[in-house]
Image (cartoon, rainbow, N blue to C red):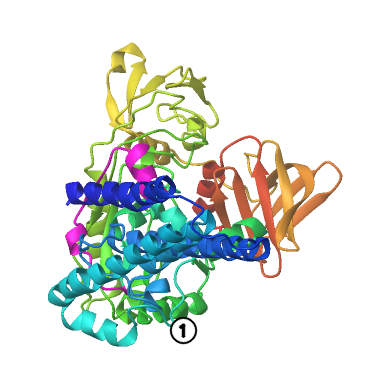
Amino acid sequence: MVENRAKNYLIHLLFYWLAVPLAIILLNKPGMYYPTAYVKILIKFFSIILILLGFFLAIKSSLLHFMKTGYLPSIFFIPPRFPQTGFYSHSRHPFFLGYGLFLMGGAGFLGDLGLDIGVLVFIILIYFSLYIFKESSYNHIFEDEYKSYRKRVPFFYKIRGEKGPSILKLIAYPAFFLLSKILFPVDSEGTQNIPEGEGVLFISNHLSYLDPIFISAFCHHDLKFFTTADIYNNKFFAFILKKMDTIPVKKYQRDPRALRKLLRTLRKGDSVGYFPEGKRSWTGEPESFPDGISRVLKLVRQPIIPVSLCGLDSFMPRWSDSWRRTKAKVIYHKPFKIDRKENDEQIRKRLSKVLHSPNKNFQHRIYTSRHLNQGIERLFWRCPECGKINSIREKGQRGLFCEDCESEWLLTDDHKMVKIRPKDKAGLVKSIPEWYQKVKEYPLPELPENGYYKLKSGLCILKKKMDQSFQKLDKGYFTFNSERLIFFGRGKQFTFSFSNIDHISDPGNKTIQVTLVENQYRLLLLEGSTLKWMTIFDEFDLSG
């Protein structure tokens, strides 16, 4: 299969986009007819129009064909499926229609009558070959499905058809594919489990920002991913995400509108990518599924394919601002069968076992030693050895140590940590989640009945959401008591009563978001750990 695809890519590029245009240029012999200057200008103008129109149609059709099948258009290569959306709902062979227009425009621009006739004969031969070889092969392989398609879509072209993916999304798809091959030693498994038709719900664990790229790179479906509605506040990202056909969903609250759009998208025959965990884990350990996930899955009538992403938690850990080249794997499991009699807890357990077990047992591998420990103190906001808060510091590019008890660790290329000091405990090797588990075992300072909490934040910036973006209000620090969160700025004090706070969340590794009934505020931490404060708020049940 891989060899056939490589051969298909090579022949398509060398023949259609190199050999044929080069032959037209070399065979050009202008002078067989001499139009007037006015006619010559008209011929050049319409030739340029044909070149641009044909090139656009051919390129967009090629990209859509690649997205849907994994192959580029060719007369003799028969893909495992055939596209039916976009230009392929207007014409059964839109690439060759666009390519023919491109060649005719090129020949007309060069001004050789004999060459024009030769190009026309070449195009007729292409269409004759398509009708004799490709059409008969499609009829034989796809049978009734292709017969139904032939009834809906003409051989040449019709005006009305279905809207396909944007050109931006079509360009992004091969870019995703190349990224997965060049930057990462990535393997895929279980692609045979993906249904040939459209309308599939891909449900996956969530490890990194690249998760949608890796899922899309091997499934050959036009995926529409759920994404956080807050990102649409940024006009640039909103434009990109709309072109990528993402579905905005509100976090930390029920969003029936997003659910309806999910079901409507699947019924239309489009495929959707869904990360039920909603956010990336700080340690790589799985996050909990939202309440009611079984209700969502029971409403889906289309195939549900669980996807396990492995190794991407070491690509760019949530606590880090730097990325590293890592080993990765994408596993497409067999369709997930929903038993209507199962309750929410039973479905959660089954789904978690399918999605999370492969990554837990995956042999992680990092292929770069560049600053592996960058930001590690955000995760280890207290020492795993002595429990001292804010005592962990980076050492070199791989080490971390405690200023209080002088314990020291070294990060390894397999996403683990080796104890270096003290010497009597040196050599102990555990995974990062295992070391972090020790952090959670230490008790937190108790919340006093009067006065403020013992801990207060370092320097941070307070922002308020205004006109769809967050604007800076002040710089200072915050603390809290049992009733309210207080920000002490340089010029003003801001108070947020917990009774008015809907929820407190951590959309980034430096950001805490405070959502009230009518307003949203963000605390951008210039010092300290977001994870520390979310752990404290959760401990005292203050995060909503």
Residue at (46% x, 78% y) in the render = 261
Q: Quadrant of the C terminus?
A: bottom right
Along the viewing direction, whichever of 341 and 276 lies nearer the viewer: 276
Can residue 340 be seen in the rendering of this structure? no
Q: Position of residue 252 (x, y in %)?
A: 52, 65
Along the viewing direction, whichever of 391 and 172 lies nearer the viewer: 172
Residue 290's place in the image compared with 160, above or below, is: above
Question: Which image quarter: residue 333?
Answer: bottom left
Kindly give the residue lying farthest to the bottom in the view shown: 151
Is 180 a magenta residue?
Answer: yes
Element under disc 1 = loop
Kindly give the residue lying farthest to the left in the view shown: 140
Q: Position of residue 86 (x, y in %)?
A: 42, 72
Question: Which image quarter: residue 94?
Answer: bottom left
Instruction: Describe residue 100's horizontal placement relative to residue 375 as left or right.
Output: left
Q: Amino acid at mark 1?
A: Arg
Write down the residue under mark 1. 160
Give the magenta range. 175-199
Along the viewing direction, whichever of 437 and 69 lies nearer the viewer: 69
Is 28 a magenta residue?
Answer: no
Q: Position of residue 370 (x, y in %)?
A: 44, 24
Residue at (33% x, 71% y) in the render = 93
Q: Position of residue 372 (x, y in %)?
A: 43, 27
Residue 321's place in the image compared with 409, above or below, is: below
Instruction: Describe residue 464's horizontal placement relative to residue 394 as left or right.
Output: right
Residue at (49% x, 79% y) in the render = 256
Count residues near mark 1 (Cα–Cα under 10 Å), then give few for <14, some for 14-19, many for 20+. Answer: few
Can residue 30 be seen in the rendering of this structure? yes
